[in-house]
Every structure is written in structure tokens, then in C-alpha cells.
């Protein structure tokens, strides 16, 4: 077990997911240059930042699609090495990507079990999948779909997002990461998806919401993590922050207000950038 951060009262359970000093280069491009993220169960943590700030790269590293070049990941307080997407899924980390990767020609049930179908002998266990899909949708209070045997092609954008999110929580997930879930939606559908996001957190999941939309962020997030040019500018509590402060952090990387909730790892040394003293000796 790791020890609590110095000076921090550690009465709360450890975060479901924590990244400290995450770095990722693509050749000469420093996409992530020291990212710290803390996502707790029962909370929506918004991940915001300008185009190119590194949001998608960060979630891909967390999901095991790319390896971090440096930095540490903790899952429920324990050091974790997420080597590939299957490992992330096994641990209970699910990502809903913006393109959703749903199959239009399949119904809702088959989409929810895509690639992880339940079988009885060599046949698909249709009855069990249907029951389980219905249970999950009911548990998320999803009432907008007419039939779970409806083809996904006939669903609205908001309904498709709902199916993708329900698919992510079907697997005993602990952390669900949503990449811009409302980007393509109208007002009413956005509201439905945000309510669903809130219910996921209320059900005890740690939810990470990537968003450009300040209305969405301030409506649903408990905590806001701002990335600026591949670095964490701050992680602040929504209730103790303001749009002006978050926009300042997004556009300039700093704000006149001190962050209300420092990211636990903000002071951790970055592995591949040792600090040296005047004699060139590495400082501890
Ligand atoms: N596969 C890749 N190869 C090379 N460079 C990449 C790759 N993926 C991302 N980058 C670069 O890394 C930086 C961060 O990109 P990323 O897609 O993570 O940003 P983002 O915050 O998700 O932006 P947006 O809001 O536009 O989606 C950018 O400079 C981008 O060009
Ligand atoms: Mg992106």
C-alpha cells in the first residue's frame, strides 16, 4: 500500500483512479508533459482543456491503448500497470469514445454484449443477454428506448450514447470515462445524457467526463481537472470555482485563485525530468 500524501488527512477511501506525473511523447511531440488526475467513486471528474491539450491522449493511456512514457497510475490505491485495453477492462475501467463504435446493423442487446457475448454451450445465450441488458438499462433509469431489440441504426444520437454508456457499465465497472458524450446532441438529449452521467456517479462509479462545454461541466461535475499544453494546470472543486477561473486555467494554464483541491500528485517528482543542483547532482 502506498502511504498517504504528506500532510494530507487520508480518512477518505483512496481514489478509484489516480495518475501522477503522466508523460507521453509522439516522436518530437510532447503530448503529455506531467499530468495528474484524481477520480473518486461517486464523483464526476470533468477533464477539460483546449484543442490539443492532451485529453484524448490521457484517456487512451489510461485505457491501455498507448503506454505512458513516464509517471504512475494507481487503481483503488494500488500501483497499476495498464498494459493493454483488455487489462483496463478487466480492472473495471471502461471508456466510451466519441465515435461510440456501435454496430448499426445489430440491436441494442447485441451491441451491449459486442465482443463479450454470453454463451450457452456453443450458442449465444440470447435470453440471458436480453435480461441483463434490460436490467442495466432499468438500473440507469433509461426509459427512452422503445425496445431493446431495436436496431441501433434507428436510434437518436442521445439514445446511441445511452446504449454506449450502458454497455460500459455492464461489466462491473469502477471507472467510466466518457469522451465528449454530448458533443453531437441537441438540448433535450444533452440533458438526458447528463442525467445519466450523474446517475452513474450516484451509483458509486468514478466518472471522468471529457468536455468542451462549460454548461455541461458546471451542471454535472463535482471536480474539474484542467489540462494546459499537456500539463495539469489545476484540479478544482466545481462548487468552489467559477467559469471565469476555469476558462482562465484553460486559456492561460494558471489562475489568480489558488486551486481549491490540489491534485495529490502535483508535487511529485517527474521521473524523466530530474531536478539538478548547481553542481549537476540530482536532488531528491
Ligand atoms: N497518434 C499521434 N501521433 C502524433 N501526435 C499526436 C497523436 N495523438 C495526439 N497527438 C498530438 O498530441 C497532442 C494532444 O492531442 P490530443 O488529441 O490528446 O488533444 P485533445 O486535448 O484531445 O484535443 P481535442 O480537444 O482537439 O480533442 C496534440 O498536439 C496532437 O497533435
Ligand atoms: Mg480529443
Image (cartoon, rainbow, N blue to C red):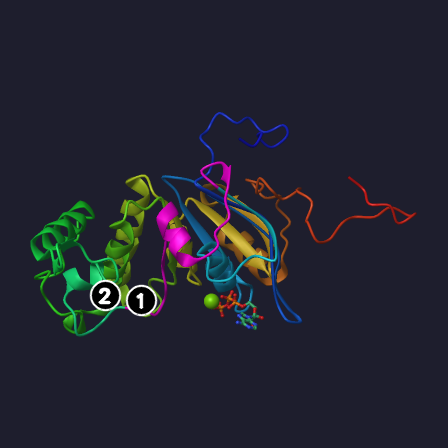
Q: Earlier in the sequence, mark 2 or mark 1?
A: 1
Q: Position of residue 278 (x, y in %)?
A: 91, 48
Neighbour tally class for label 2: few under 14, some 14-19, many 20 plus, Cα within 10 Å:
some
Q: Which residue bears the numbered disc 2?
A: 160
Q: Are marks 2 and 1 in contact (CB under 8 Å)?
A: yes
Q: Secondary structure at mark 1?
A: loop
Left/right placement of residue 53 relative to residue 181 reads right
In the displayed orientation, state which residue is furthest to the front.
121
Specify the label residue 138 is tagged with: none
What residue range appears in magenta? 75-101
| 39 magenta-colored | no
The residue at the point 58 percent across, 41 percent down is 262
The residue at the point 41 percent across, 52 percent down is 87
Q: Which residue bears the numbered disc 1?
A: 100
Q: CA distance from mark 2 to mark 1?
A: 8 Å
- Of residue 41 and residue 221, the one placed in the foreground of this image is 41
Left/right placement of residue 155 relative to residue 213 reads left
| 93 magenta-colored | yes
Q: What number of labels is visible?
A: 2
In the displayed orientation, state which residue is furthest to the right.
279
Q: Position of residue 90 (x, y in %)?
A: 36, 48
- Of residue 27 and residue 148, the one placed in the foreground of this image is 27
Image quadrant occupied by the C terminus: top right
> Does the beta carbon at disc 2 come under 8 Å from ligand 2?
no
Amino acid at each position: 500500500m502506498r502511504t498517504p500524501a504528506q500532510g494530507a488527512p487520508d480518512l477518505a477511501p483512496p481514489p478509484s483512479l489516480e495518475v501522477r506525473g503522466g508523460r507521453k511523447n509522439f516522436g518530437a511531440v510532447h503530448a503529455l508533459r506531467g499530468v495528474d488526475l484524481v477520480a473518486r467513486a461517486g464523483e464526476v471528474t470533468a477533464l477539460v482543456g483546449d484543442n490539443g491539450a492532451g485529453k484524448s491522449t490521457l484517456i487512451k493511456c489510461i485505457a491501455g491503448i498507448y503506454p505512458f512514457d513516464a509517471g504512475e497510475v494507481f487503481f483503488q490505491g494500488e500501483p497499476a500497470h495498464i498494459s493493454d485495453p483488455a487489462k483496463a477492462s478487466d480492472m473495471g475501467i471502461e471508456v466510451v469514445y466519441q465515435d461510440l463504435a456501435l454496430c448499426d446493423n445489430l440491436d441494442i442487446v447485441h451491441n451491449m454484449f459486442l465482443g463479450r457475448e454470453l454463451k450457452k454451450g456453443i450458442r449465444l445465450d440470447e435470453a440471458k443477454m436480453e435480461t441483463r441488458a434490460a436490467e442495466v438499462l432499468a438500473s440507469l433509469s433509461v426509459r427512452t428506448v422503445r425496445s431493446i431489440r431495436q436496431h441501433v441504426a434507428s436510434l437518436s444520437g442521445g439514445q446511441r450514447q445511452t446504449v454506449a454508456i450502458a454497455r460500459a457499465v455492464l461489466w462491473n465497472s469502477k471507472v467510466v470515462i466518457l469522451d465528449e458524450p454530448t458533443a453531437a446532441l441537441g438540448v433535450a438529449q444533452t440533458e438526458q445524457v447528463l442525467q445519466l452521467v450523474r446517475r452513474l456517479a450516484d451509483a458509486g462509479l468514478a466518472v471522468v467526463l471529457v468536455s468542451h462545454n462549460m454548461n455541461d461541466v458546471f451542471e454535472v461535475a463535482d471536480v474539474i481537472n484542467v489540462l494546459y499544453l499537456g500539463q495539469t494546470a489545476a484540479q478544482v472543486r466545481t462548487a468552489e470555482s467559477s467559469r471565469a477561473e476555469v476558462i482562465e486555467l484553460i486559456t492561460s494554464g494558471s489562475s489568480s485563485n489558488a486551486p481549491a483541491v490540489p491534485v495529490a500528485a502535483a508535487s511529485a517528482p517527474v521521473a524523466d525530468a530530474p531536478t539538478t543542483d548547481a553542481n549537476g547532482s540530482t536532488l531528491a
